[in-house]
Amino acid sequence: MDFHLRDKVAIVTGATANIGRAVALDLSAEGAKVVAVGRDAEAGARLVADCKDCGAGEAIFIAADMLDPASPAKILEAAEALGPVEVLVNNIGGNVDQGFFVDSDPAKWMADIDLNFGTVLRMTHAVLPGMVERKSGAIVNVGSTAALVGDYMLPVYSAAKGAVHSFTIVLAKEVGQHGVRVNAVAPYATIPTDPAQLSKGSRFNPENGMFSKGAASVREEDRAIRQRRTFVGKPFASSDEISGLITFLASNRASFITGQVYPVDGGALL
């Protein structure tokens, strides 16, 4: 199926691992000009080579920390050297801390909020004027099922992803009259399709210990509360099972879809 993305410039944040990497490769396979954003230059170089092998019209890597307010302008400038930006995938996100809210450190709240929501606001704010002026564009935000049901022991992360969902809906109302569509995908538990391609900063990288540290403090009662089951024969999605929907929503094949939040959960929320 032709998604009509050939030679369209697409920015993907958090592109060096997991869902972002899969999205960049899917867009490349459709012939898009991919602007991959991340912090790990080594992983970025690997991704660019793989994007070109997949058939990208062009592929470049921009080393940028999305927590830096100056980064969106830098990214946009590099992207526009390839042409007008038609697609933005706001994929950057993750949890800075986990545990019960009563025990949380207020100094860490804003880190979770800024990583998951502030980055979406800033990157969208940079790209949107050009889309509005050209009356063309598609924005896909990566939310989470945590925003729909609340991930146990991830209260601030869940709330921040809820903000991403709400922002998606209201922005779609604002910019639809300008030919710009805005949607979101809410993944459940997702693991990298190719663990060998993890970037240094990925929370899935064992060296960062994000999940092992949290697991050590979880009691059996808490583990039972967190437990969910899927109905598709496996507990997790691979990243390329999420990226296909994102690529579709970014394409003209989804031209009548806007303001929607799509859970991809294997039935876990049933």
Image: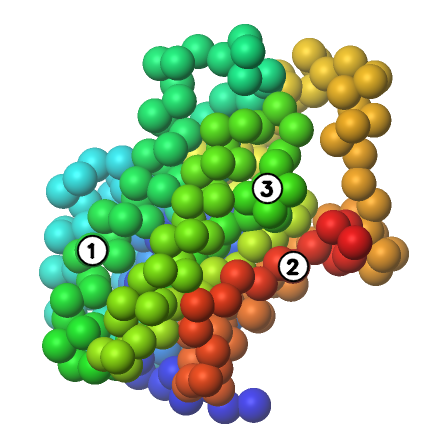
C-alpha distance separating marks 3 and 1: 25 Å
Disc 2 residue type (three-letter): Val
- Which of the 4 quarters of the picture holds residue 209? top right
Between discs 3 and 2, the one toward the N terminus = 3
Q: Amino acid at mark 1?
A: His
Compute the Cα span from label 2 to label 1: 27 Å
Task: Mark 2: give few (<14), some (14-19) or many (20+) Cα within 10 Å.
Answer: many
| 242, 59: nearer the viewer | 242
Find disc 2 in the rendering and name its residue.
Answer: 264
Residue drawn at 43 percent across, 80 percent down: 251
Q: Is residue 229 left or right of residue 107?
A: right
Mark 3 or 1 closer to N-term? Answer: 1
Residue 268 in the image: state x and y as whole percent. Answer: 77, 50
Q: Pointer 3: residues within 10 angstroms few (<14), some, or many (20+)?
A: many
Task: Tell me which label, 2 or 1, sits earlier in the chain.
Answer: 1
Contact between marks 2 and 1 (CB within 8 A): the answer is: no
Where 29 falls versus 149 (above or below)? below
Establish if 105 lies above or below 22: above
Q: Position of residue 2 (x, y in %)?
A: 50, 90
Tag 3 secondary structure: helix
| Disc 1 target residue | 125
Q: Residue at x 20, y 62 (%)?
A: 127
What percent of the width, then of the height, locates residue 8? 30, 80
> Is the C terminus in the top left, top right, bottom left or bottom right quadrant?
bottom right
Under mark 3, the amino acid is: Ala
Against 12, is 146 above or below? above
Residue hosting label 3: 146
Does residue 88 appear anywhere in the picture? no
| CB-based contact (under 8 Å), mark 3 and mark 1 | no
Figure quadrant of the N terminus: bottom right
